[in-house]
Image (cartoon, grey):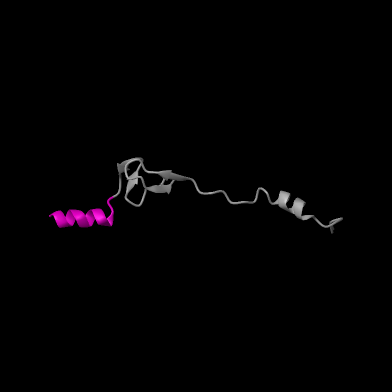
Amino acid sequence: MAVQKSRKTPSKRGMHRSHSALPLPAVSIDAKSGETHSRHRISREGFYRGRKVLQTKADAAAAAAEE
């Protein structure tokens, strides 16, 4: 069984862990609404790449109120 020869110093431990940090998620800003969202995902307002692609509950309620 392999046994280390000497204790790893805090400096070497830090160097070993230097690539272990989690990256920040990529965030985009919608062109029309200015809302932030994950890349390649529909925003909460139902926009994707500046176009309305999904009718939200608020949109359905507004449409029902108009009729």
Quadrant where the image shows the C terminus: bottom left
What residue is at 72 percent from the left and 49 percent from the top? 15
- Along the horizontal axis of the image, is 41 left or right of 64? right
- Along the horizontal axis of the image, is 22 left or right of 30? right
What residue is at 79 percent from the left and 55 percent from the top? 9
Q: Where is residue 56 in the image (x, y as percent from the top left)?
A: 28, 54
How many labels, in total? 0
In which image quadrant can residue 28 be found? top left
Q: Position of residue 37 (x, y in %)?
A: 41, 48
What residue is at 14 percent from the left and 54 percent from the top? 66
Q: Give the overall secondary structure of the magenta segment.
A: helix
Quadrant where the image shows the N terminus: bottom right
Q: Which of 34 and 60 is in front in this view?
A: 34
- Along the horizontal axis of the image, is 53 left or right of 16? left
Is residue 46 on the magenta stretch? no
- Along the horizontal axis of the image, is 14 left or right of 39? right
What residue is at 76 percent from the left and 55 percent from the top? 10
Q: Where is residue 13 in the image (x, y as percent from the top left)?
A: 74, 53
Q: Position of residue 60 (x, y in %)?
A: 23, 55
Chain part drawn in magenta? 55-67
Q: Which residue lies furthest to the left in this view?
A: 67
Q: Residue furthest right?
A: 5
Is residue 64 on the magenta stretch? yes
